[in-house]
Image (cartoon, helix red, strand yellow):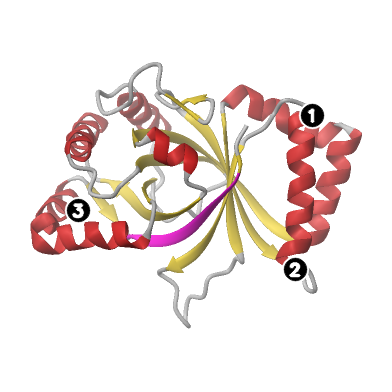
């Protein structure tokens, strides 16, 4: 990937996070003030030989009890690829991906406890005995949210589109604000739209940032594809030509496994 210069990335994040595209200052989602950036941890996991998903999930359930004990609970979701970019020459290397969203300070506290407390270290050792998980950290920002749908829908679909910017942050932020205004007027089945910027451990990420579009079902996802086919492709072409190089969408299934 093309690595952004730190100063440019910082300016871009400030521009997008302070943009009119963001939500109201008091907007809460699953207990987080998502009008501000928050941390997202990605666990890219492959089960060890002989380990089942049920074996692994039993450990995750114990982790939820541990996180509640120390008041460091994240929003925890698990995704599996449905319509991916992978093929026989480039197979998907993981069994699943988990995302843990939290405010920054509690997440730092969580990791300190995970690495130093007796019960945290025991869980960490158990985790590593069950799977190989590559852990990454990113900034998350919600730009559009149907709060009721997102907080009550535990089975949904997330389209990922990784992009590398062609323009400065002011132009990109303004374009995203236009999209949010359009989505707000006509969501067409979309219940959430967010951006994710890797900040630690993601030198091989497919782009500088990712668009995440969240759908309650496949009918909604295909409804937006129909909208693109019937003329919406012009807006996509403009974005790809003038604002960012993007890989195109991959669709994952998503299950919400825990909310604080």
First along the sequence among labels 2 and 3: 2
Q: Nearer the viewer, residue 227 or 151?
A: 151
Residue drawn at 40 percent across, 69 percent down: 85
Based on the picture, tell me whether residue 252 belongs to the magenta stretch.
Answer: yes
Classify mark 1: helix, strand or loop.
helix
Name the residue that disc number 2 marks: 52
Residue 22 magenta-highlighted: no
- Disc 3 to disc 1, how far (Cα)? 46 Å
Q: Estimate how packed mark 3 is, as few (under 14), some (14 to 19) or many (20 or more) residues with alpha carbons within 10 Å.
A: some
Residue at image position (41%, 45%) is 3
Residue 248 seen in the figure: no
Q: Which residue is identified by label 3?
A: 240
Q: Residue at x 38, y 62 (%)?
A: 250
The quadrant of the rendering that contains the N terminus is bottom left
Q: Which mark is residue 166?
A: none
Magenta residues, dominant SS class: strand
Q: Nearer the viewer, residue 156 or 163?
A: 156
Q: Residues under labels 2 and 3: Cα distance?
A: 41 Å
Tag 1 residue: 69
Magenta-colored span: 249-257
């Amino acid at each position: 990937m093309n690595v952004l210069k730190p100063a440019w990335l910082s300016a871009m994040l400030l521009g997008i996070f302070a943009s009119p595209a963001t939500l109201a200052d008091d907007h809460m989602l699953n207990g987080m003030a998502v009008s501000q950036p928050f941390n997202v941890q990605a666990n890219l996991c492959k089960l060890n030989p002989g380990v089942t998903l049920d074996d692994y999930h039993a450990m995750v359930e114990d982790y939820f009890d541990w996180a509640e004990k120390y008041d460091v609970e994240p929003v925890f979701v698990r995704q599996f690829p449905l319509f991916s970019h992978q093929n026989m020459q480039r197979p998907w290397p993981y069994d699943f991906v988990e995302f843990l969203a939290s405010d920054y300070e509690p997440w730092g506290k969580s990791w300190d406890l995970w690495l130093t407390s007796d019960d945290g270290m025991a869980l960490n050792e158990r985790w590593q005995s069950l799977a190989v998980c590559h852990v990454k950290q990113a900034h998350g920002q919600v730009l559009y949210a149907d709060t009721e749908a997102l907080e009550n829908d535990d089975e949904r679909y997330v389209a990922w589109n990784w992009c590398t910017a062609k323009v400065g942050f002011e132009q990109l932020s303004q374009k995203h604000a236009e999209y949010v205004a359009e989505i707000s007027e006509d969501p067409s089945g979309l219940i959430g739209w967010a951006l994710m910027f890797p900040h630690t451990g993601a030198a091989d990420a497919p782009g500088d940032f990712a668009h995440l579009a969240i759908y309650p079902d496949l009918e909604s996802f295909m409804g937006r594809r129909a909208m693109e086919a019937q003329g919406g492709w012009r807006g996509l072409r403009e974005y790809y030509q003038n604002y960012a190089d993007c890989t195109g969408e991959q669709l994952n299934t998503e299950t919400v496994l825990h909310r604080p």
